[in-house]
Image (spheres, rainbow, N blue to C red):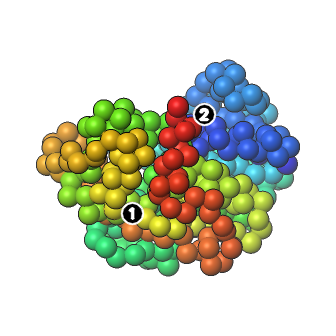
Amino acid sequence: MKILITGASGLVGSRLCARLKRAGHEVVALSRDGERAAAKLGVTAFSWDYRNEPVPRAAIDGADSIVHLMGENVGDGRWTTARKKAIADSRIVSAKKLIAARPGSLASFVSASAIGYYPGSGDEIYDESYRMPQQVGFMQALCRDWELAAAAVEEYGVRRVSVRIGLVLGKGGLLQKLLPLFRAGLGGPVGDGRQWLPWIHIDDLVKILELSISDESMHGAVNGVGPDPVTYATFARSLGAAVKRPAFLRVPATALKLMLGEAAELALGSYRIVPRRLTEEFGFSFGYADIEAALESAIALNT
């Protein structure tokens, strides 16, 4: 099977590339720097500037599946008007160009989405049955429009899966940034620590993406999160225990809001999300169902 992956050099994409290569698939990557991506990933890679260029025909022709993971980092600085546009365009404009260039061979289109699709407040448990109201903030609107852009491929008879991804525990990402602080005994919860954090181990997420590519029964939105969300306080305590350090230094919510403005909702929002469709409809079995085992494994990947 020929599988085209965008965002292939990132935390998730690089792990997915390696797994698909081992399974014997032909993996092709689209990246800002194709030469660098090819050297890093050991796959055929093409450079693509989605803003100014069409999708390279040599990359997409003959593809059986597209996995669309690219997107500007939503947690990288304040959400200025220009930053919001870059975050949205990198996901939505690129998806539209991929779909416009789709080959006749295409059977599935798997797109990243995010748990920001859901309201970030309170203790209420959300699954894929949630219906978004019309008036929402930036993150919810972004995820809605992102999924709608991907869903347009269904008009051409192509199966589409949007995976709403939580905090990914793997090599790199947020965990890599947190580890030095926690190892120095400077870690702790954000805000009051009562907000819910839906997490997932990188290997479970990669298995979900691989299943989304190949399982013809999978369609629509699925929550790419572990079965047991935890509060920030529990996460901080578990990470501290994993590195054998205390973790009680709180990051005040007011300080975070001053630094990040509207983007602070990424850390202060409470997202109690469960993977109902994965477990009930598709019988998915998680390799890392509890936070302690997931952190132990993910920390080992970062050493």
**Residue at image coords 47%, 39%:** 173
Q: Amino acid at mark 2?
A: Ser
Q: Percent from the top left, x then y, of residue 105?
A: 84, 52
The answer to whether 209 is drawn above or below residue 279 in the figure is: above
Q: Amino acid at mark 1?
A: Val
Q: Is residue 297 left or right of residue 86?
A: right
Q: Is residue 301 visible?
A: yes
Q: Quadrant of residue 158?
A: bottom right
**Residue at image coords 35%, 35%:** 183
Residue nearer the viewer, 14 or 7: 14
Q: Quadrant of residue 153?
A: bottom right
The answer to whether 138 is drawn above or below residue 274 in the figure is: above
Q: Percent from the top left, x then y, of residue 121?
A: 28, 67
* Residue 260: image tag: none
Q: Is residue 116 left or right of residue 164?
A: left
Q: Is residue 83 left or right of residue 117?
A: left
Looking at the image, is mark 2 or mark 1 nearer the viewer?
1
Q: Which element is circle 1 on? A: strand
**Residue at image coords 23%, 48%:** 248
The answer to whether 71 is drawn above or below residue 142 in the figure is: above
Circle 2 residues within 10 Å: few <14, some 14–19, many ≥20? many
Q: Percent from the top left, x then y, of residue 254?
A: 13, 49
Q: Which residue in the protein does label 1 denote?
A: 230
CA distance for labels 2 and 1:
29 Å
Circle 1 residues within 10 Å: few <14, some 14–19, many ≥20? many
